[in-house]
Amino acid sequence: MQTQTINVQTGAPGVQHQLQVLCFGTAGPKATIQAALHADEVPGMLVAHCLRERLLKLEAAGALLGQVQLVPYANPMGLTQHLLGQHQGRFDLRDGINFNRNHPDLAPAVAAVVKDRLGDDPSANLVIIRAALREAAARLDATHPAQDLKNKLLQIAVDSDVVLDLHCDSQAVMHLYALTPHEALARELGALLGAHAILLATESGDSPFDEACSRPWYTLQQQFPQHPVPLACFSATVELRGEADTAHELAQHDAVAIIEFLRRRGIVAGTPQALPAALCEPTPLAGSEPITAPRAGVVVFRQEPGARLEAGTVVADLVDADSGAVQPLVSQSAGVLYARSATRWATPGKRLAKIAGNTLARTGKLLSP
Ligand SMILES: [Zn+2]
């Protein structure tokens, strides 16, 4: 294992945040796995800890056919952000911008470079595009530390065949997000991890990290239909259940599933095991139904994460402290309740729960703020 230390642009004299990249293997197909880009979502850091141990053993046994870059904490800035006793790891306290939004879109810069160089051979096109992606990522510059952090993370991951961004939700069952044209690989990963929901979109809005890695290939494929462009980077945001779900058994299970996924990608040696039975069918992210509080009140959930709901199910009651009214909040769609809020005081407009349905067709920005 080689350790690479990368300095993030400093925000003040005397302050230096650093990323560590643990590199296993030296050649062949590459995977990048990063944990806790939302710095208060720490189950991924525990999975990274399990992966480090397993990858060290695989490397020592000569069982790595490719390379794995492990970023055990992707947001050192966010790890330091505490406000009045609460960890604030989702948004940059400087400007309120979500650490997993507004990642650079390299597609326009790459398109300009490759437009006259693409040919009829998909593997040659892959090499040309990947080199252009590396160069475009290397040219990114930043005016503040959070933007620089996003640039550095993309520079690490940009030429990977597989990118897994490990997050979690507030209270949730295992679920993941990926690009619609990567449905087959998302199904494999979902079956191995035991996902209860697989949410697919060609663009979820606001450029989360997984899409900054995978979408340029899709964009170029759409832009140059006369040339074969492979979707050469599979990327997924993996939501490792809820923020309090740090258990050694769960983390070991998830690490085993990820290693098995890497084996299927030719990065880890050995014969892949048969896939476990899938717990869900993929659904469109546009069909994910937010259950939103229409007013302030005390939240009393009537359904647990993982529950399979019919349309018209009462998900929660909202109790109004002024009038004493109890308002049931009802799902419009059938589907799996894959995540819910961890707080029990609703402010008007707060998203309290999410249901993976396929009857809604939302438009615009599809992710939570
Ligand atoms: Zn997150």
Image (spheres, grey):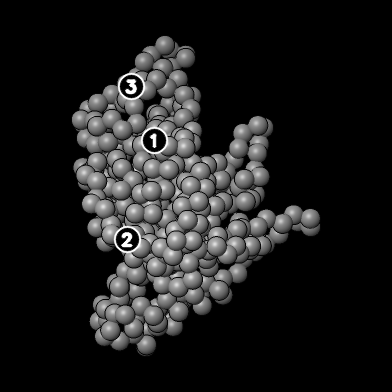
Q: Nearer the viewer, mark 2 or mark 3?
A: 2
User: Could you tell me residue 367's position as x and y percent?
Assistant: 40, 47
> Is residue 350 something one can see in this rendering?
no
Q: Residues within 10 Å of mark 1 (few under 14, many from 20)?
A: many
Please give the residue where the numbered disc 2 appears in the rendered image: 270
Q: Is residue 61 above or below residue 73?
A: below
Of labels 3 and 1, earlier in sequence is 1
Q: Residue at x 28, y 30 (%)?
A: 307
Q: Quadrant of residue 326?
A: top left
Q: Nearer the viewer, residue 328 or 301?
A: 301
Dot 1: element: strand
Q: Which amino acid, mark 2?
A: Gly
Count all numbered tags in the image, as a single digit.
Answer: 3
Which numbered dot is residue 302? 3
User: Could you tell me residue 241's position as x and y percent?
Assistant: 40, 38
Disc 3 and disc 1: Cα gap in Å? 15 Å
Give the left or right position of residue 151, taking residue 63 as reference.
Answer: right
Identify the residue at the far top of this view. 324
Q: Does mark 2's beta carbon lie closer than 8 Å to ligand 1?
A: no
Q: Is residue 119 above or below residue 103?
A: below
Q: Quadrant of the N terminus?
A: bottom right
Q: Are marks 3 and 1 in contact (CB under 8 Å)?
A: no
Q: Nearer the viewer, mark 3 or mark 1?
A: 1
Q: Nearer the viewer, residue 268 or 357?
A: 268
Please give the residue where the numbered disc 1 appears in the rendered image: 172
Give the left or right position of residue 306, taking residue 246 as reference.
Answer: left
Q: Which amino acid, mark 3?
A: Arg
Q: Nearer the viewer, mark 2 or mark 1?
A: 2
Of labels 2 and 3, earlier in sequence is 2
